[in-house]
Amino acid sequence: MRDKMDLTVGSPFKKIILFMLPVLIGNIFQQMYSLADTVIVGRTMGADALAAVGSTNSIHFIIFSFMSGLSSGVTILTSQYIGAGDMKSAKKSVAVVYIIGVIIAATCTILGMAFLKSLFVILNIPERLYEDAYIYQFICIAGFAGILLYNMVSSLLRAIGDSLTPLVFLIIASVVNIGLDFLLILKFGMGVGGAAWATVISQSLAGVTCMIYSIGKYEIFRLNLSDFKIDKGFFWDHVKTGLPISVQNSITGIGVMFFQSALNNIGPEAIAAYTACSKIDSFTVSPMFAIATALVTFTAQNYGAGKPDRIREGVKMSLIAEVAFSILSGVILIIACKPLVALFVGKGETEVLRLAQIYMTIESLFLWSAAVLFVFRAAVQGMGVTKIPMIGGVLELTMRIIAAVVISRIFGFVGLSTATPLAWVAAAAINVFYFIFKGGIINERVRKL
């Protein structure tokens, strides 16, 4: 395979950073066109339109998280086979990813469309936002297969050590998405539906073109019928590795749904404030996600190669970098919150700006816990131990429910704003505990390879 990066040799931190950079740039571009959607909707159609899009974020999150979690989870084994030099099993692993991708895309799309109205009832969508929210979310669900395709191919490319190719196609998708935003929303007046179509079309285009390119470039993507002759044990090994990650993501999504329901009860101003803050926050943590994404592949390849010392070194250096970045970012976000949120809703939305400052301050003070969570969860997942992060997801769900059901009733929006920080701290604790105190499992399992 040409142009792939071997993460089992060389300076661990240097390799992680080099692998991470295309992922980071890709995340930034992804956030940029997400921001473009939000800014265009908020500034051209008002705070209610922005709230309509934001009021259903948890639905999008839970479905997409399940799909992407499973597809990225099973590619952990692909990385391990590549690290071990077993290319025959690696190709069969790619075939498994294709099969699982088709099954999950079809299932989630059908169920999502069938139960969308029921989910709206659970979320307590305000009546004045209902129509726009339904249009936006229905279109997104209908196009989930195309969105999943890009993420599935990207996960496979990163598994073989190529983080650059997904970046190139994501940049193309970003440019197309922003162009379609202006065309469909401003020129053709399609409203929030235009924003949804822009996202679906651009991501699907990126998925199809990225897959075609990858098939032409990498032999591992060019499968024969014999590669699909997979025994049940091999198939279920992948499912058992990937399913806990998708369940973990879905459990987190359920927690977000509880949060969203409580938020929707507070009112459109609170929804708009949270929607703007979440976009800014997603942009901010992109470097942390990028390092974690690189660390998963780094750990998986070195686990397969039987090099536990490199895993420990990679974790240590990644943790230092992420915590330092999180502290600096938290300070900047607290200071710059209102000017940044004003870009979405305008300076006249004083109540939205006030609530945004509250939310951003509380979350920024706990960004360090997100850094700790991302690093140790990535390391544990890369080892193929996916049940621990799933348990972490259960703890995240518990904390979000407590914040939404109990703390918010006592302290209102301030209490609700503690949901994500509490979730980070709880999930980080179990992943840190496992890696540090059960870390001997790395040596034990590597010796058995």
Image (cartoon, rainbow, N blue to C red):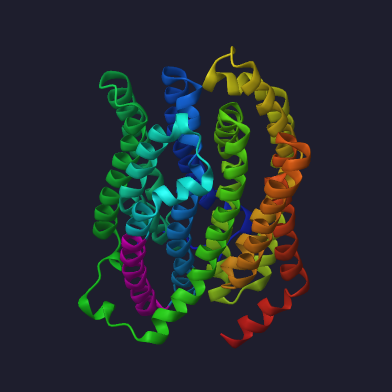
Side of 136 where 369 appears, left or right: right
State the image coordinates of residue 151 (x, y, percent, origin top left): 40, 53
Q: Which is nearer the eye, 101 or 159?
A: 101
Residue at position x 42%, y 86% in the image? 233
Residue at position x 60%, y 87% in the image? 448
Q: In which quarter of the image is the N terminus?
A: bottom left
Number of marks in the image? 0
Q: Which is nearer the eye, 144 or 94?
A: 144
**Residue 98 falls inside the magenta stretch:** yes
Side of 195 where 399 appears, left or right: right
What's the magenta bit mostly, secondary-structure-wise? helix
Please tell me in which quadrant of the rendered image residue 275 appears: top right
Residue at position x 44%, y 53% in the image? 64
Tell me which segment is drawn in magenta. 86-107
State the image coordinates of residue 427 (x, y, percent, origin top left): 69, 59
Side of 53 where 382 appears, left or right: right
State the image coordinates of residue 51 (x, y, percent, origin top left): 50, 30
